[in-house]
Amino acid sequence: MNQKILVTGGLGYIGSHVVVELQNEGFDVVIIDNLSNSSIEVLERISSITGIKPMFELLDLKDKSSVVEFFKKHIDIIGVIHFAASKAVGESVQLPLLYYENNLNSLIYILQELQKKENSNFIFSSSCTVYGQADSLPIIESAPIKEAESPYGNTKQIGEEIIRDTCKIVPNLKAISLRYFNPVGAHKSSKIGEMPIGTPQNLVPFITQTAIGIRQQLSVFGNDYPTIDGTCIRDYIHVVDLANAHIAALKRLINGENESNYEVFNIGTGQGSSVLEVIEAFEEVSGQKLNYQIVGRRIGDVVSAYADTTKANKVLGWIAKLSLKDALKSAWKWEVNLRRK
Ligand code: UD1
């Protein structure tokens, strides 16, 4: 019997890539998704990559009784990877209560079910946003948590605290928070990738949509930052590398290799790239000239963020293998493929 893993938000951008890697590793996967920011089509796309259709439950994790029922039905779940959450920074400023309700209630309801189990393993999708503008770079996990810039960012900070506090008093619950830097790129099959609804807020989908002609021009938010070329620095990590970090974290918990029952890891490449460097790399791998313009700074942007990945490399035995160019090439192939239909 294969081990059964629940992936919440498993039809989303990162979740779908994790489902593929889990299936490749021989896990049985059950997905919960409410389709608020994803499409049911992704289920078929996942099975066309792996040859296995994951189990699927259309369910809203804000509905506590459905969560209780779900865990009664799937009593053999041994691990949960929790992605389901709202993630638009700007929207969260406009709709804070919706973000707190959605992102925190769902987390609490899942943990309430996990603490009933004899043994459970939980991976939380956190973000480098918890560091804000770090005082020193690269960023290590012990860097101070800064006041959140947005309700979205705050839900990640509070989410981590909820898990930490629960783990303190529930010894049979083991958890890891993965603090992602900037996930980009798509699966090499071009069957799954990032599918923003409406205007993309993140850099790479905006670049690919501009290159394909859906957007007229990319706005580069500020070139007067204290960096090599004046534009902001981020640590862009290929989504497939990121997905594999989840497998490493999950196996660590399942095999009982964790040092304490709550741990935190940075998941990035350790390499910082400026916005202009990303544009240049994209132009090189795609052969497209990108129409862009420098505009004013975006409120809330940090100047520079890239990970110290030593802990993840040593303790999880995981390392990012793919480059920024690999990621941009796959993102472009995915975009071209999407628009072909
Ligand atoms: C953003 C969120 C972060 C969240 C992450 C999820 C903000 C302030 N931060 O990170 O909390 O965890 O997404 O993916 O929204 N850029 C442009 N033009 C664009 C878009 C972006 O120049 O049209 C620049 C930004 O100024 C930034 C870089 O590209 O320097 C990356 O931006 P983005 O992809 O939005 O990611 P973050 O801001 O790092």
Image (cartoon, rainbow, N blue to C red):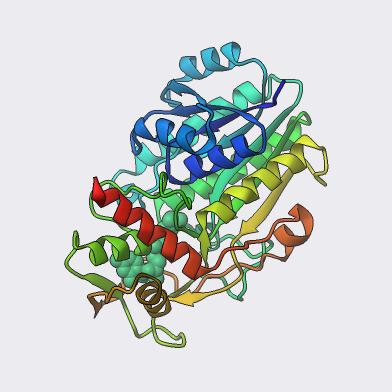
- Quadrant where the N terminus lies? top right
Evaluate whether residue 271 shows in this view.
yes
In the image, taking residue 110 as reference, residue 206 lies left or right, namely left
The image quarter in which residue 121 lies: top right
- Percent x, y of residue 249: 69, 45
In the image, taking residue 235 as reference, residue 22 lies left or right, namely right
Residue closest to the far left:
216
- Percent x, y of residue 257: 83, 43
Compare residues 288 and 40 and report the one nearer the observer: 288
Which corner quadrant of the figure contains ligand 1? bottom left
In the image, taking residue 144 as reference, residue 130 lies left or right, namely left
Task: Name the residue rendered at 67%, 55% in the picture.
Answer: 265
* Position of 20 relative to 142 (above/below): above
* Position of 237 relative to 155 (above/below): below
Compare residues 290 and 163 and report the one nearer the observer: 290
Compare residues 310 and 153 and report the one nearer the observer: 310
Task: Name the residue rendered at 44%, 39% in the picture.
Answer: 85
- Percent x, y of residue 93: 32, 51
Task: Name the residue rendered at 48%, 27% in the picture.
Answer: 32
Evaluate whether residue 10 shows in this view.
no
Compare residues 166 and 21 and report the one nearer the observer: 21
* Position of 7 relative to 231 (above/below): above
- Quadrant where the C terminus lies? top left
